Amino acid sequence: MEWTADVAAGDWLKERLDAGPAWTRTMHGVVPRGFPAYARIFHPATRDRPVGVPWPALPYAAHAREWDAFQESRPEIDEERVTWADTAHAFGTTMHARAQWHRIVGPRLVDGEDGPRDAAGWRYSDPQPGQLEPDLVSVVARTLTAHTTTPDDGFIALWEGWGGVVGAMGYGPSRVLATATDDSSEAGARHQEFLAHAARDSFNDVFRKPSWQPGVLSDEISRGPRLSLPNRDHVLFRAGVSELARSEWVLTAPWRDTELERHGFAPTAESPSLVWPVDRAWVLVTEVDYDSTIVAGSQDLSRALCADPRLEALPIDEGADLTSDADGVNR
């Protein structure tokens, strides 16, 4: 993947996107119109539950002693990915193409608590908006390569707003790795001093001028042109979808956060926000505010994605509304 300043390569997308007041009315504020078919790929959620014992009662404030004892016992916790369909089954709701997560789990949240629970004791965490799991990016990409004449040539766009990806003018580091440590060594002391000065001091910095703070991407890229679409600006890279089809695609992503890796974290990279081949046979859209990924393309492509057992995907009509109030089935 190589950064490109040729952002005009994405101008054709603007012609197919809704702008102005219509931007939020349908998915076409971010998903191009004019394709024969669309598939909605649902980002998986996660759920967990203690092994062999139930969760203590809710709410926490009324059962603090039980929760303290529960934590001290260090129970084994099962955790797993879960589909929207299995979640709907657990909560007695209906899975469908325009489903919204908060409607699927229903009004089962307790104020101040950390996730809905089903009758079997599973606690559910929300799907990640704007993020398709890296392994599923590869799964989708492998199907996409078979539905374009240019699998090795295309474009990948990344939303510029992911924290710390691009440099910017500011009063402190564009990103801060906030960690707690009991390290009393000289290195530990230096790290704590860094954290102490990382945030802006509004009293002492009244007359301080902002300065350039580097991001993960180079200063050249950070200061370079953007692919500007309605309400979203992106950094653009020249790359074929075949690069994303490799299971280790994260290791070659230019926005891979190697600073986190130096602190012991596994390699990570945000999901591509937009992907399309030179022949424009399809477009993949992982919108930052959506908990699903939309692929616009041919009928055959849509059927292939929806038939893949590794994905949870359903065909969705052009003009579909995916706003938070769109799920009229599970009201």
Image: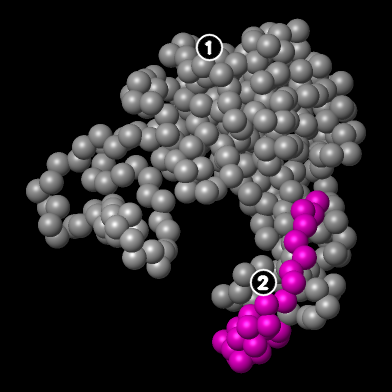
Picture mark count: 2
Q: Is residue 7 above or below residue 119?
A: above
Q: Earlier in the sequence, mark 1 or mark 2?
A: 1
Residue placed most toward the observer, 126 or 327: 126
Residue located beneath label 1 in the image: 9
Disc 1 and disc 2 in contact, CB within 8 angstroms: no
User: Residue 306, labelled with which disc?
Assistant: none
Amino acid type at mark 1 = Ala
Residue 9 in the image, given as x and y percentages of width and height: 53, 11
Q: Quadrant of residue 244?
A: top right
Please tell me which residue lies in front, 232 or 202. Answer: 202
Q: Residues within 10 Å of mark 2 (few under 14, many from 20)?
A: few
Residue 35 appears in the figure: no
Question: Residue reaching furthest front?
Answer: 185
Query: Which residue lies at the image location 63% right of the left edge and 23% below the top edge?
Result: 275
Q: CA distance from mark 1 to mark 2?
A: 45 Å
| Magenta-highlighted residues | 56-83
The quarter of the image holding the N terminus is top right
The residue that appears at 41% across and 40% down in the rendered structure is 164
Which secondary structure, mark 1? helix
Kindly indicate the quadrant of the structure image that contains residue 204.
Answer: bottom left
- Please tell me which residue is depicted at 80% across the width and 16% down the height of the picture: 147
Residue 208 shown left or right of residue 174 in the figure: left
Which residue carries the number 2 mark?
Answer: 109
Task: Please tell me whether residue 36 is drawn above or below residue 52 in the rendered image.
Answer: above
